[in-house]
Each structure stands twice: as structure tokens, then as C-alpha cells.
Image: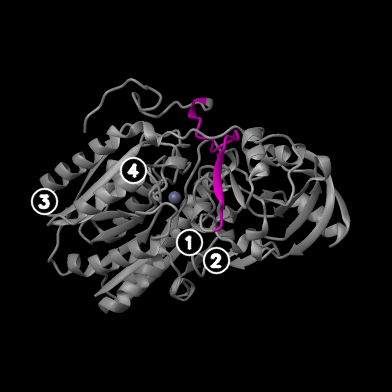
Amino acid sequence: MRIAIGGISHESSTFATVPTGLDDFKLRSGAVGPELIQRFSGTKTPIGGFIDAARVANYELAPMMFASATPGGPVTAEATEVLTGQLVDGLKAALADGPLDGVMLALHGAMVSDLDDDGESYILRKVREVVGPDVPVIVELDLHGNITQEMVDLVSMPVAYDEYPHNDPYERGYEIGLLMPRIVRGGVKPTPVLVKIPLISSLQRQHSYAEPMLSVKHLARDIENERGVLNVSYLPGFAWADIVPNNFSIIVTTDDEPAQARRLATQLADYIWSRRDEFIARPVPVDEAVRHAMEASEGPIVLADIGDNPGGGAPADGTILLEALLRLGATNAVAVPINDPESVERAFAAGTGNAVSLHLGAKVDTFHGTPLDVSGRVVLLSDGLFVHRGLMSTGVEMNMGPTAVIELDGANGGKVQVVVTTHRYQPTDLEVLRSQGIEPTSRQIIAVKSSVHFRSAFTPVAKEIIEVDTPGLTSPRLDRLEFHKIVHPVYPFERDMEWKA
Ligand SMILES: [Zn+2]
């Protein structure tokens, strides 16, 4: 048995002003051909899961390619064509070497391309053109996928992450890797059923450590344990995409029992609908959050700058929370990151230990505050490379590009350190600070540009976590954005609507 593996992964915000091009994919983890195995063996990634499952189940892998980029604007036509072309070339090369029994792909589910609002269907159509309609194709998806019926029809079955923060891409990859031989050898015939719930939920209320997602996860696990059920996936989706399939998706896959799959997907969908209001975030005003963190008897208090999360396509250069920290005189505080290559260059020109004045942040668009004219001292300069040590992306190297830690002078003698980076990065691992000489547990306030993923690493060290109501591209206040394509009625836009799966 021989299975081709690979993937293309992107989460696209149609509201982000910077498109995602080929160079953005090169910056992030990528590999072609046999390098894929080398690169992802031992990592807690979907491909890492495929590799280990193939070893255990004793089948051969034909590596194609994998590419991902930090969430941002829609993927350009060029990048879509070049990357899909690479994947298809890898598939053809694998076929030229011998027969293929299946394909396992790590996709996202929320990729919007300039060529197709449904980026995954674009990729899968090209894959089907090569392998035909009958070869088993299983895709792993991020639970932020905005799923279409076409995408489900193009695959044998989709399997989404269960956890947000995404601590289980490896486990789901492993699950797929063990399902594949059962399908190839004919013992199992997957029948996935998709049910769409007219609910656009706040990213901040999707995390699986707390209600309502905790109960959703438990109900999904109970359903998955029912006889004949292969997988239950629940995808609350990615709100900042003005596309038709933007809402909550349930996919239940059974073994040749579509009626059972539909019944169970309906049950889960109706349960989620009954708790719809709990999926809407209600963040704390900026000044109130900062004052609370300053007054807390014990730190660290983690302030989540949820409006400017690079993991949701925001520029990570927003200054609104940083401005409040400086103005209100916060001290022993750190903000991570501010993405501003120009300020990094100034810090490098000044040198470690020296004074520097900056026109800092808010340069990419007008949604995240205005640049701050600030002065301070360069504390540390680095290449911005570190390896994830926590639960998420364990073993994966991150490249923030040249990075500077700068201590800024605030009001009333306040001191706020900022980690200023060349590339965008969402802080999901304590190494983002420790690699920069900052021990998170000794800080009073840590401001992170993240909606939820920071919780994976910061929950164990935080005395308290506050979601701060910063405006921006990843603010849960969707009424501040202009949607044209989403399907109405949809909650919470139509607050009084009724619905049943
Ligand atoms: Zn995600």
C-alpha cells in the first residue's frame, strides 16, 4: 500500500489589506518531495501524524509538498497556481513511480484564493483531475474552516482538529493515517454528511478549554463512540471572511450509513444552536483592562489584544493597547509582538543598551491605531529564531526575523518592554519571550496579540486572562465590518431568528 501526502494551508481574511503571495508561503514552514518526511518527522503537525501512522500501520508514503503561510489577505492567483501546480507535480511524480492507493492532505478549510472563494475545492479539483474520482482522499482541516458541500463531495472524508488552541493536529493526522488502510482495503466506506448552522461565532468563544465548546466537544465524543461512526468534526469557522460558507459546520462521517450521519449531525447542530448566544464574545474596554492588570496583587495578568491577532490575518502592528499601557503608567509590562521592520532596523542601528526613538507600529492599515512616537532603550537584539517547546507546534522552528526588545518609557515612570519583530507571529509559546531574555512568570502584565492560541502556553502561567476590546481586523464586533456575500439570516446579525437543523 502506497499513499501520497502533502498539503497547502492558509486561513484568509477577506478584510485584510495585504494579499498573501508566494513569498509569504516561503517564510513559513514548507518542504518539497523527500524533504517533507525529514522536515516533519517528530513534529506535532498533521504531516507528522501521517508519517507516524504509516510507520505503525506499515505502509509506504509518497511525499508531494507542503506549504503554509501566516493568515492574511486572500491568496493571490499566482501563489494559488504555483503551489497547487507543485502539489499536482508531486502527485504525478508519485504516480510515475508506481501505483497509488490513496492521498492524505493537510489543508485548512478557510483558504480564500483570488481564483476561488473556496480555495480548498480549487486544490481538490486539481488533485481529482490526476487521481480520478475513486481513489480515497482524506483531508485534515483546521476547525476554523468555512466548509462547502463541494469540498466535502471532493473527498472521501474530512477530519478537523478537535482542539482550539490547536493542540491536536498531530493526533488527527495520526487518526487519518490509521483510517486510510481500513478504507483502501475495503473494510470501511466513509459517508460524510455536512450540516451548516447559521451562526457566525466569535473566535474568542471557540476555545475548547471552556464553555460552550467544552460541552460541544464532549457531545461530539459521545456521538463518535456510537457504533458505525468514523469521525465527528465541528468547525465553528473563521468569521472574517466575506464568503458564502462563512458559518458553523458539522461533519459526521459514518461507515456507509448516511442516514445515521445526518441524524447525528442534526443532533449536534441543534445543540450548538441552543447555545448560540454563548458563542458571542463580550471583551473588556481597553483602559479598564489595563487598570485592572496594574492593580492586581499578583501577576502575570495576560491581556489579549484580540483585535490585532496575526493568526487571524491582522498586521500585528496595532498600538492601541500599547498606547494605553504607556499612558496609564504600567510597569514591569511586556507587549508581544509589534511587527514593524522599520523600527527593528532603527534598534539595530542604535545597538544594544543604547537609547532609541521610534515612530512605532500601525503602519500597515488604519484599523489598529496610529504610530506612536516613543523613546526608550534597546535591551536585546536577536535573529528571532526559536523552537516551540509547548503543546502547540512542538518542535517546529519559528522565524520572526531580526527582532528587538525595546524598553519604552511610559507615564509616571512606567516601563513597558516591546518585542518588535520583522515578520508577523502570533505568540503561542513561552519561547517567544524566553528566547528574547524575558521570563514571563516574573512580569506583572503580558500583552499578547492573539485571540485564543496564546492560552495554550499562557494559561498555566497567567494569574488571570483578560480579553481586551481592541478594535481591528480580528475584533469580534462584526457589525463594524461590511459583509456582502454571507448568507442571511445568520446569528448574531439577525438576533431574533429561529432555526432548526
Ligand atoms: Zn485555526
Between 277 and 71, the residue placed more toward the observer is 277
Residue type at mark 4 is Ile
Task: Decide if residue 62 is on the left or right side of residue 383.
Answer: left
First of labels 3, 1 by sequence position? 3
Tell me, yes or no, if residue 8 can be seen here. Answer: yes
- Per the image, the residue denoted by label 2 is 388
Q: Earlier in the sequence, mark 4 or mark 2?
A: 4
Q: Name the element at disc 2.
A: loop
At 54% across and 55% down in the image, what residue appears?
458
Determine crowd level at label 4: few under 14, some 14-19, many 20+ residues with C-alpha closer than 10 A.
many
The residue beneath circle 3 is 257
Q: Secondary structure at mark 3?
A: loop
**Secondary-structure class at tag 1:** loop
Q: CA distance from mark 2 to mark 1?
A: 7 Å
Q: Earlier in the sequence, mark 3 or mark 2?
A: 3
Q: Are marks 2 and 1 in contact (CB under 8 Å)?
A: yes
| Magenta portion: prevailing SS class | loop
Task: Tell me the element at label 4.
Answer: loop
Image coordinates for residue 418, horizontal then vertical, percent: 72, 51
Residue 392 numbered mark, or none: 1
Residue range of the region highlighted in magenta in the rendering: 461-479
What residue sits right under mark 4 in the picture? 147
